[in-house]
Image (cartoon, rainbow, N blue to C red):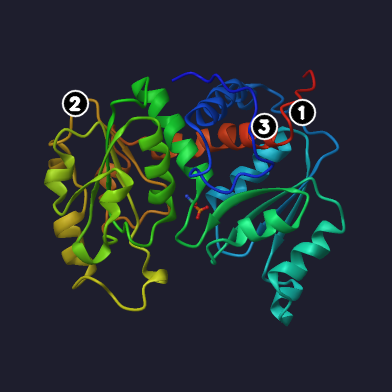
């Protein structure tokens, strides 16, 4: 689907759940236009000159934080990076007080990552700035799903009718929730696979197929998306050992042969090599894992641009 929308309806990007298929296509089409900026000798356009974006990361991040900062700089925005460590959050200041104090310095947008689901929505209801969800607990990670979709569309030419198998820790993943919303809205076929202890009850109601074997998930897949076991979100191990997990759900070149010819392998990162994926696959010819990271910059440029109102200054 190519975009028919010309603007986003909301001032915020809180999740994929709130987007229409036309808005998703608009973001992906806009990102295609921005991809070229990163290939220029001078990787910068004046689009967001004079705008202040605060990156409020209250949880660890490598890819998302760096990618947003690069996207903001490529659009000529003024950027400020705020992390809980070293701030008055360590003295007990609440998220709302922190955000209201940052708002008093008049940012135009706030990118937030937080361990509590719903934190971005709380700020969006309170503050006039545009709020972008960079991951809230196990709820949503919308820009990850958008960059995943961009990468699938780039490699396979479409989203509609593509068979996407998502394998791993479904229960604790915000990436999977955003991807299910996006891929089902765009008419892709989604299969989920994990040990039963890592599969949320009744997730089939989101319009996906659930299987409990890696081989079954790989059969007929065009896209194999592997997810990390999120040990930090589990109070106890929900499977016997990491070695046993790799033996049953770890992706190896031999097992990948069950997927369709030309299938691509994705992972949002960070990877646990030797747990959900072998290095031979992660670094192999089917892997598009680093393309996902590259595409994240263009997709985040598109999101920032569209939330700013889509008023492009001439480069
Ligand atoms: N994919 C992703 O969100 O990675 P980071 O946690 O490093 O940002």
Residue contact between numbered discs 3 and 1, judged by CB atoms under 8 Å = no
Position of residue 209 relative to residue 34, above or below, is below
Q: Going from the N terminus, do you reach mark 3 or mark 2 first? A: 2
Residue 171: give its label.
none
Q: Residue furthest bottom?
A: 91
Q: Going from the N terminus, do you reach mark 2 or mark 1 first? A: 1
Residue 47: give its label.
1
- Depth order, front residue of 255/108: 108
**Which of the two discs, 3 and 1, sits closer to the camera?**
3
x, y percentage for residue 62?
Answer: 55, 53
Q: Which residue is mark 3?
A: 306
Whole-number angstrom distance, CA of label 2 to CA of label 1 = 41 Å
Quarter of the picture containing the C terminus is top right
Q: Residues within 10 Å of mark 1 (few under 14, many from 20)?
A: many
Q: Quadrant of residue 215?
A: top left
Q: Quadrant of residue 170?
A: bottom left
x, y percentage for residue 98?
Answer: 76, 67
Q: Which residue is mark 2?
A: 261
What residue is shown at x 29% (from left), y 43% (from top)? 207
Residue 102 in view (yes/no): yes
**Which of the two discs, 2 and 1, sits closer to the camera?**
1
Quarter of the picture containing the N terminus is top left
Residue contact between numbered discs 2 and 1, judged by CB atoms under 8 Å = no
- How many marks the image carries: the answer is 3
Q: Residues within 10 Å of mark 3 (few under 14, many from 20)?
A: many
x, y percentage for residue 302?
Answer: 62, 31
- Depth order, front residue of 184/227: 184
- Depth order, front residue of 275/14: 14
**Which of the two discs, 3 and 2, sits closer to the camera?**
3
Whole-number angstrom distance, CA of label 3 to CA of label 2 = 36 Å
């Amino acid at each position: 689907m190519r975009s028919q929308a010309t603007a986003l309806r909301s001032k915020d990007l809180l999740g994929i759940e709130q987007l229409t298929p036309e808005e998703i296509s608009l973001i992906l089409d806009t990102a295609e236009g921005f991809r070229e900026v990163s290939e220029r000798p001078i990787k910068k356009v004046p689009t967001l000159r004079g705008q202040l974006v605060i990156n409020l990361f209250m949880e660890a991040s490598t890819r998302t934080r760096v990618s947003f900062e690069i996207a903001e700089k490529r659009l000529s925005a003024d950027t400020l990076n705020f992390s809980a460590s070293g701030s008055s959050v360590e003295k007990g200041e609440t998220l709302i007080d922190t955000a209201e104090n940052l708002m008093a310095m008049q940012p135009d947008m706030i990118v937030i990552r937080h361990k509590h689901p719903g934190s971005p929505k709380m700020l969006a209801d309170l503050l006039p700035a545009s709020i972008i969800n960079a991951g809230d607990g196990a709820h949503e990670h919308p820009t990850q799903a958008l960059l995943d979709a961009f990468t699938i569309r780039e490699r396979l030419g479409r989203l509609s009718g593509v068979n996407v198998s998502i394998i791993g820790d479904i229960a604790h993943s915000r990436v999977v929730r955003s991807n299910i919303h996006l891929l089902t809205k765009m008419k892709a076929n989604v299969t989920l696979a994990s040990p039963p202890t890592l599969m949320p009850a009744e997730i089939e109601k989101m319009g996906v197929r659930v299987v409990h074997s890696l081989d079954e998930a790989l059969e007929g897949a065009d896209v194999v998306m592997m997810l990390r076991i999120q040990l930090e979100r589990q109070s106890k191990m929900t499977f016997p050992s990491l070695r046993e997990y790799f033996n049953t759900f770890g992706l190896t070149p031999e097992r990948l042969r069950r997927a369709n010819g030309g299938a691509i392998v994705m992972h949002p990162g960070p990877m646990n090599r030797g747990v959900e994926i072998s290095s031979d696959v992660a670094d192999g010819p089917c892997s598009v894992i680093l393309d996902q990271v590259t595409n994240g910059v263009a997709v985040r440029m598109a999101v920032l641009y569209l939330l700013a109102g889509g008023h492009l200054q001439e480069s």
